[in-house]
Amino acid sequence: MIISLCITTLALILCHHPAMLLALRISMRIKIVWSSVIIDKCLHLSYDSDYHRNISSILNLLQSQTRRFDEFSLLFYHLILVPIQTIIILIIAYGYLGRSSLIAFTMFITFALFNSYLSRRFSSQRSAAMAFTDQRLKFLNETFSHLRTLKILALEQPFIRRIFLARRMEILRIHWPLVARSIMLSFSMMSSRVIMYLTFLLSLIIFNVIDIEEQFSIETLLVSITLFERLRFSLVWTLPQAISSSFDMIIACQQMDRFLAEPNVHPTNRIRSTFSSDKPIVHVNGFSINRHNNFNLNDIEFKIERGQIMIVIGPVGSGKSTLLLTLLGELTVQKSNHFKVIGSIAYTGQEAFCFNGTIRENILFGRPFDRNRYRRILQLTCLDYDLEHMPNNDETIIDEGGGNLSGGQRSRITLARALYSDSDIYLLDDPFSSLDSRLAKRIFDQCIKKYLHNKIVIMATHQLHFAYDHHDGHNIRVLLLNSGQKQTEFYPKPLLEPLPPFIQHDDDRILDEPQQRRQHSGGKHSNESNNSDSMSTVGLSLWYDMWQYLRIGSTGFGSIYLVLITSIGTQSMLYVCDQWLSQWQSKTVSIENFIQIYTAIIFVGIIMAIVRSFSFYQLCHQASETFHNQLVNNVVISNDNHFDGQILNYFTRDIGVLDETLPATLFELNLALSQVMAIIIVILFLSPYMAFITLMYMVMLATLLEHYVRPFHRIRKSELTARNAVFSHLNSTINGVITIRAYRIIDYFQQRFHRLTNVHTAELFGQNVSSRIFCLLVDLISLIYIISILITLQWFQCYNQQLIGVCLASMFNLIGIAQWACKRAIDSDFCINSYRNLLIFNHLKHEDNYESVKYGTNLKVASKLAIEIKQMSAYYDGLVKMPALNNINVHVKHGEKIGICGRSGAGKSTLINTLLRLVCFDGHVRINGHCIREISTFELRRHFISIIPQSPVLFDGTIRENLCLLLTNYNNDDHELWQVLDL
């Protein structure tokens, strides 16, 4: 019998894991189709769709919802298998328990249905928690994107409080569904014991069993425990998960259906922008655009032919960009007497679009390479000089969104792309906003007036001097828009004097920093991140980092020690329960006392399981919330005011892992390790000869883990890198979809996406294969261990008679539980990497004297202030040998108005940054005789210096809320508010 049992178990192991791998292959194929549908829809989605303003929803469709396919592919067959398995077990149980088996079966069904119901409720609550996560991320993005503005306006503390409040609401929404899920999981682990107890008790009450000892013999109890354990796993564990996974799949498909139901860009709009023509023309008459129930453009008319330049001007919100989008075919014309756009179109958006590729790929944009034309374009846009100073010239890889390039470089790359396309019509939306006046003037003369002299150019801009400066007889016209209405159209008079050079637009922004600092800062975070992602083994590093992380939240009910005590206590109660059942026919206690003690054991076990679940998740979420708030506070008050776009990815991905994935993984690791250790302890008590075999078993598992973890982490990291490349490409494609459609290279971006998807699929398949092989080896080692124990028991015939039944009943549970524990240990180590990644923000250098120094809030601001700067030198990033300002001496008296002039890069911004203590400096800077180093940084910016940034920033919220942020003493008094508005 033992031999047949081992052979059956071996056959189960050899069939189970290949079946899992086949299911994952089916899941991968479905995900490929799913992602292809998403990218195709994104490239044809209407510009007015809500998804264009909420890109995270599209990324969620690809990132979060595709995980449902893996879960469903691994669980869907249980919907068919579990009912068949349940019927077979019920027939066997009926042969042993008779009518009592019907009680057990009824309770299992009730438990399974209740679990399924709760799973559905928890899934809906997880969806509700996503809204609070989106709100927190929106606040974080707003804070980090405008961190410098918040600092110079001393508004960081209100924004920090807003983030903390959003975080608290998010944690509350996440916490209770996970706690309830953990309680369900704990109950499911002990449900076989509870149902055995209820079956035993109800059989006495309902069926009035007279010969209770004969009905529930030791043999019957051991067989029943084994059958109930199998039924528990099927009915209480896998079936509810399969049902929940099925509903999740339905929800994912419904979300995809809503996404696919969004309107595409209107086909008739795109027809207007035809291919190249010998007689290109843009002729519109009396057309109107109605967006969001508001006429953005009304009764617009003009006509432009080859060789003409039209400069569209007007205040913010006048409809300049809307006009260009309409000519592109992105918006539908509600009313038009005549609308004709003939010729191929090149387009540059207000925000320069660069995708993750080489500079050459961004300029060619899917077109054939023409060396001569390419070199000429680089010279015209002044990119040749920039490329000479890059390590890989035009083969330099551009980060997502162009994060490793300056704003001016990104703008010139998009302009070079337009020029290289050799189109008939050029629609340029404020292309020179990121360039200084001299460079913008040079490029305008070389590119717009000379290179595009025989093309149609329509350029929206705020810089009027392009219309007036030396047009040399060029056919330049100006279209003035105001509130969507055409105010006038005129030819600028050639005799008008050009604007004085010192009032021309200069992009030497106060909020900008030297490019050297930007690259240094971005590289610093990237390098540290890479270092933190280094591979580790499942050993002391995991347990130490886990201890350090959980200790952050170890207070009150969420105490580490309470979790350890209740975990040991819960597992102890389970095996005390089995051991007490084995004493059933010992004649040492009466039936009444037996049932009372049995009831007490079950009750204590349930209470301890509930306390364990509550305290464990309380511990994890206290640690996550406290750690998140520490990180936000450290970033905001750090000395580094520029963070690349990846910082939001840290607070999205890694904090999300600490919120949900890590607690769930650690809780399952807790359950699995508790069961494995309990089984091993029972085996050791069974016979002293088992110690050596058990030691060899643990050494084999540790050796396998040691040799598996490092390669698996490398495979998993490669898969994550490939997956991030897919998401990065999708994100950049959505951001630049207007440009992509304008150049008619939809197929090019689809092919790039499919290539990246193929790479990710290959990496994912390698990860799945390695994972299945590892689980197979762990199960085989566990089977060898079990066979060795059985042979030893048979050979020596020396073992504890009271424990043999419990040991045999639970020993085969090692197959499955052991590999579950090993997998969860590896997953926990991978999840704890998120904690390691985020530690780089915990070690940021804070601003000097941020809150409390010699002069703080008690320093009274004088009515008359004077500023004295003496022998001051300022520098960035500790580059003392390369000062941005050198030996500056200035004395500003009260009431004086000082203008700071100089070329781009002369140090105008650095001087202002020095007063605000945003840069390091030597020398003396005093306000009314007090050195600004002795004034708290926060109080200096809040009470002593007020600034109007050149780039205005509006934060999410009402206009009143934006105004009230700047009113220091605002107390809901409309008089003060209107007084400021009247000024």
Image: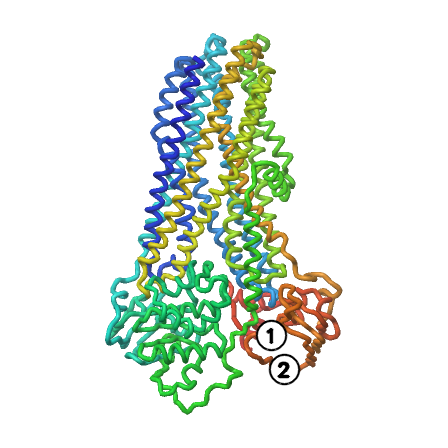
The label number, if any, that marks residue 897 in the structure image: 2
| Residue in the foreground of this view, choosing between 914 and 199 | 914
| Residue in the foreground of this view, choosing between 561 and 752 | 752
Label 1 secondary element: loop
Q: Is residue 206 above or below residue 177?
A: above
What residue do we see at 57% from left, 68% from top? 513
Judge left or right: residue 459 versus residue 509: left
- Res. 308 image quadrant: bottom left
| Residue in the foreground of this view, choosing between 522 and 659 | 522
Answer yes or no: is residue 751 visible: yes
What residue do we see at 30% from left, 63% from top? 744
What residue do we see at 51% from left, 77% from top? 506
| Residue in the foreground of this view, choosing between 394 and 508 | 394
Among numbered discs 1 and 2, the one appearing first in the sequence: 2
Judge left or right: residue 333 versus residue 319: left
- Residue farthest toward the front in the current orientation of the protein: 372
Residue 338 image point, x, y percent: 24, 75
- Res. 153 image quadrant: bottom right
Residue highlighted by disc 1: 907
- State which quarter of the image contains the N terminus: top left
- State which quarter of the image contains the C terminus: bottom right
Categorize mark 1 by other alpha carbons within 10 Å: few (<14), some (14-19), many (20+).
many
Residue 613 image point, x, y percent: 55, 35
